[in-house]
Amino acid sequence: MLEGKILKGIGGFYYVKTTQGIIECRARGIFREENLTPLVGDNVKLRISKEDNSGYIEKIMPRKNELIRPPVANVSQIIIVMSIKKPNINTLLLDKYLMMVEQNDLSIVICFNKSDLASYEFENFKAIYEQIGYRVILTSNKLNMGIDELKDTLKDHTTVLAGPSGVGKSSLLNNLKPELQRETGDISRKSSRGKHTTRSVELLEISDETYVLDTPGFSSLDVSFINEPIEVRNYFKEINKYGLECRFQSCLHDKEPNCAIKEYVGSGQINRERYENYLLVLNEIRNIRRY
């Protein structure tokens, strides 16, 4: 059988890259019986029908990992793209993204795009997240800034490019590889939010063994993937680290007395906005579990 990688899936058809080119395929019915759905990024085995030359996916190879949102397999890293201006940064959304990726134990890079719009603010956010332990890249399509660093970061990886609409994900891809000709959108003046331009999950080949998933942007993120409030501590790196100093092992760092986290927030060693986002997520999980 022919081997390949699923680059795109639309309406029950899968487009698989093989040594014979990209082949349009359907999946065998047996996958439905096994409650298994082919995902973009899957390595598969397929056969070509001699009758109509159509392709059929016969086997899905074991996955290294699998994400629910976006639905994709065999990813090696995630780059979260945010802007500080146009649209304004939503740190709660960024921190929820980080939580989701931390849960999947994937390599994370934060990319602050449009850094020509407010250089001081970008450097400030860069310092906050680097102090936590994240790698941060500053980019600007307008100034062609950080593009080489981004290209090096992508090399030999399968990367999910995630983030809200309007932050410039598609524009960055066009800068990296102009022949992709990804559709880009303006910012809505009324809402100050980006307009959706990416409508499906698609694996784009930047160079040999270098793939990027440009995912549809969204302005909110459901955190129901977290089962219990106490798990939230694990996905805020600095709270997980300094929380070991708390008097009670079960400390949730919100109402307990003599909490080490509150002391670190008071001294500025933990960013106050990050801590407030932690509390917001904590209460969101409590409300979900209540119902």
Image (cartoon, rainbow, N blue to C red):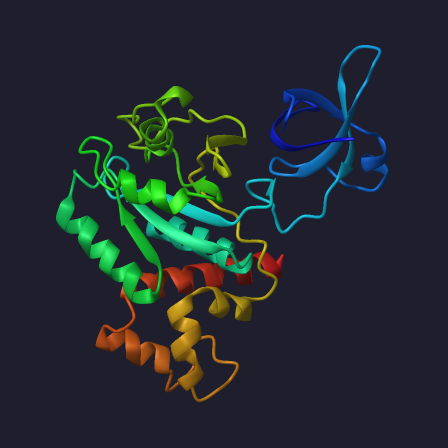
- Give the quadrant of the C terminus: bottom right
- Of the pair 129 and 20, the residue shown nearer to us: 20
- Name the residue rendered at 40%, 55% in the picture: 95
Residue 171 x %, y %: 33, 28
**Figure check: 67 above or below 189:** below
Q: Is residue 164 left or right of residue 122?
A: right
- Of the pair 249 and 211, the residue shown nearer to us: 211
**Figure check: 16 above or below 49:** below
Residue 31 x %, y %: 81, 36
Residue 2 x %, y %: 74, 29
Q: Is residue 60 left or right of residue 191?
A: right
- Can residue 181 be seen in this snapshot? no
Query: Can you tell which quarter of the image residue 6 is in?
Result: top right
**Figure check: 214 above or below 270:** above
**Figure check: 275 above or below 57:** below
Q: Is residue 56 left or right of residue 173?
A: right
- Of the pair 249 and 168, the residue shown nearer to us: 168
- Name the residue rendered at 16%, 38% in the picture: 117
Q: Residue furthest toward the top?
A: 52
Q: Is residue 192 left or right of residue 16?
A: left
- Give the quadrant of the N terminus: top right
Residue 185 x %, y %: 34, 23
